[in-house]
Amino acid sequence: MSDALSRRDFLKVGAVAGAGLASGGAPLEAAPLAPVDRVLADTMMGVPFAPTRTPRIAIVGTGLRGRSVLHELLGVVNVQITALCDTVPEKVAMAREQVRKAGHTYEVATYSGSERAFEQLVSRDDIDLVYTATPWEFHVPVCLAAMRAGKHAATEVPAAYTMEELWTLVDTSEATRRHCIMLENCNYGYNELLVLNMVRAGMFGDLKHGGAAYNHDLRSILFENRDEGLWRRCHHTQRNGNLYTTHGLGPVAFYMDINRGDRFDYVVSMSTPEMGLTKWRKDFPDRERPKDREHYVTGDLNISLIRTASGRTIRLEHDVSSPRPYSRINAIQGSKGIFEDYPPRIYLDGMTPSHQWTQIDRFKAEHEHQLWRTLGGQARSGGHGGMDFVMAWRLVQCMREGLPPDMDVYDAAAWCAPGPLSEASVRAGSAPQPFPDFTRGRWTQGKRSL
Ligand SMILES: NC(=O)c1ccc[n+]([C@@H]2O[C@H](COP(=O)([O-])OP(=O)(O)OC[C@H]3O[C@@H](n4cnc5c(N)ncnc54)[C@H](O)[C@@H]3O)[C@@H](O)[C@H]2O)c1
């Protein structure tokens, strides 16, 4: 075995710690993907949900994120939470208690104790959509199981992190006629939807460049002996590239109408050396659970450049290992001006003072998104500044009113693909990596209902 802790060992440590079990528990390991024929079934682009008066939702993975999204869903009227699943029984119990405290008296089915318990959950006949907030390696198995059992699937980000898995999600969504939605909450952020409206109103002119990132100092979280610290650091021992592409890229993809008129064409990528996690481990040694056998390979800052079919460019960054303030960059530039976030600032040719940034407040009255106009009061008390509630509310609205989801499986695949493609580019000395066309030629068609 290499001196790097093997993935299997690492996950085993995480599972045992998470379950509070004595050592010797079964290794937590994602099952191999069942092969799916590369069917050329009809597209899932623009396919509406069957209208559902009270959408019935099940949650797999009731850790920090699963319970946070559960909280948002419980704030939306006309939703029923029918089933909950987590490998750790205590976490399911906490989630069930949340449902009870929200005033619901209906029975919630619970599944626990095994990393395959979700297979029993998906076979129930009282579920319309299964949402998973498990560690990354379980997103695909849960989504596939849900779709194959006739349920729509929704997943936390990233939906998948290999090209093969991304294609499997696309193929399965098409073959089963069930949606596979990656719930990218940042697309529902206040500034993101404000800027989307301004883009659509032509305020920035013809778009040419975007900026996107997940730059978030996670060093302390990555080394915790609970929650994400049990599984997320493992990826830093295996992969060198952009591990978390979608929070920044999803909104820029909306601005640029990716898969609705343009598409990602190719990406080049490079990584800085790794320093941050090694230094943190040295500065804060963990005597209870030493992590000395781990060898971190993810460069602290990964920078990728994506070119779209129409020739636009996007700078995409990932840095979770450095001391630095939070930023998703969230920038868009066109022939008439530019917006950049963190902090939000704008420049519009002839409309704002020359050669300097201006605050965006004066544009809010006219361009605030309808979702925020309607929901802002209730949303702002929720997670991530309110975007999580807006996302949950909108998902339920699409299901209730029989609309297509705002994000389909092709969006999930396109926004996640820079993960494995950046790894391939870094490995190949930053050589360009082409994006496959997950839409099978339909990227010039269609409009989003959002
Ligand atoms: N969109 C966002 O803003 C956001 C924020 C945080 C986390 N996330 C994503 O949410 C997911 C979960 O992150 P988290 O912070 O909640 O981590 P977490 O470790 O707190 O929760 C994961 C949960 O999944 C459970 N689990 C593991 N394997 C399972 C299996 N096979 N079946 C059922 N349950 C299983 C764990 O016991 C744990 O309770 C990740 O994909 C992460 O990237 C998204």
Image: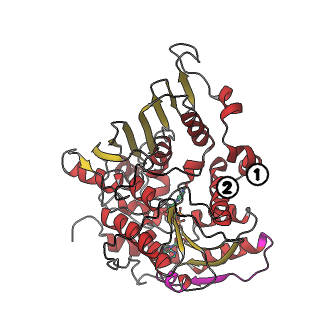
Task: Determine whether label 2 and label 1 are within 8 Å by CB.
Answer: yes
Residue 393's place in the image compared with 151, above or below, is above
Q: Residue furthest top?
A: 354
Nearest to the observer: residue 289 or residue 447: 447
What residue do we see at 62% from left, 55% from top?
Answer: 391
Nearest to the observer: residue 275 or residue 73: 73
Residue position for label 1: 378
Residue 335 point in image, percent of width and height: 45, 25
> SS for tag 1?
helix
The residue segment tinted magenta is 101-120
Residue 419 point in image, percent of width and height: 35, 54
Dot 2 amino acid type: Phe
Q: Is residue 273 visible?
A: no
Dot 1 amino acid type: Gln
Q: Main secondary structure of the magenta part?
A: loop
> SS for tag 2?
helix
